Image (cartoon, helix red, strand yellow):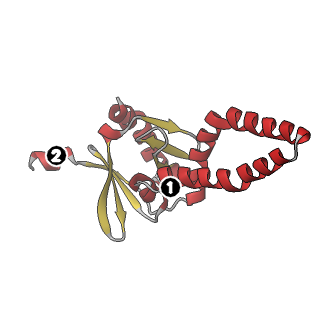
């Protein structure tokens, strides 16, 4: 075996799975909303208060709700959810976790999705691992995709801390 084969030793292969894009984008949207919620509420409150004195501010409020807010949401979706890591998070695929990173088998082809050097942090919850490669871009790896509970524990306890350190 040469060094390239040794470096890319397969540790886990998951079952085929798919994540809904709405579920993927919900995590990103909630994080962005918590950062910007106070500014949006302050702006809306100011516009509602100004509408009490002059009805023209109500028109500005409606323009904000129906023109500006959808464009901002589209910009967030376009900027974060259409990246390659996000694409491979939501399509039907099988994941191969190896010592250098994560590959996906999608459309009967193996494609490299991310390398462990790109990972900034990993968030864990009861249903999935969120492997962040950027502030708002992550790879969604559900716990149910693993074949056995022992694989999940082995990945979480032994390999994940080693990869993100």
x and y, in percent, of residue 20 in the image: 56, 60
The number of numbered badges drawn on the structure is 2
Please name the residue that numbered disc 2 is placed on: 6
Which of the two marks, 2 or 1, is nearer to us in this view? 1
Q: Check the image and report above or below for 83 versus 32.
A: below
Q: What is the CA distance from the residue labelled 2 to the residue labelled 1?
A: 38 Å
Secondary structure type for disc 1? helix
Residue plotted at (34% across, 28% down): 165
| CB under 8 Å between discs 2 and 1 | no
Residue plotted at (60% across, 46% down): 29
Mark 1, Cα crowd under 10 Å, few <14 / some 14-19 / many 20+, is few
Residue plotted at (38% across, 31% down): 161
Mark 2, Cα crowd under 10 Å, few <14 / some 14-19 / many 20+, is few
x and y, in percent, of residue 23 in the image: 59, 54
Please name the residue that numbered disc 1 is placed on: 78
Secondary structure type for disc 2? helix
Farthest residue to the right: give it. 52
Return the mark for residue 148: none
Q: Earlier in the sequence, mark 2 or mark 1?
A: 2
Farthest residue to the top: give it. 165
Farthest residue to the bottom: give it. 107
Residue plotted at (75% across, 33% down): 42
x and y, in percent, of residue 91 in the image: 46, 63
x and y, in percent, of residue 69 in the image: 66, 50
Of residues 163 and 38, the one nearer the viewer is: 38
Q: Is residue 109 left or right of residue 16?
A: left
Q: Is residue 2 left or right of residue 146?
A: left
Of residues 62 and 138, the one nearer the viewer is: 62
């Amino acid at each position: 075996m040469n060094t390239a084969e040794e470096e890319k030793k397969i540790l886990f292969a998951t079952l085929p799975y798919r994540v809904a894009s709405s579920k993927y984008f919900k995590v990103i949207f909630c994080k962005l909303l918590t950062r910007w919620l106070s500014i949006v509420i302050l702006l809306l409150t100011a516009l509602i208060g100004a509408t009490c004195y002059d009805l023209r501010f109500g028109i500005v409020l409606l323009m904000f709700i129906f023109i500006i807010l959808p464009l901002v949401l589209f910009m967030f979706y376009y900027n974060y959810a259409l990246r390659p890591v996000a694409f491979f998070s939501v399509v039907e695929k099988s994941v191969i976790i190896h010592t250098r990173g994560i590959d996906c088998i999608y459309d009967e082809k193996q494609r490299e999705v991310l390398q462990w050097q790109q990972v900034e942090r990993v968030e864990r919850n009861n249903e999935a691992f969120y492997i962040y490669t950027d502030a708002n871009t992550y790879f969604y790896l559900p716990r149910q995709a693993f074949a056995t509970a022992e694989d999940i524990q082995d990945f979480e306890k032994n390999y994940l801390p080693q990869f993100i350190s």
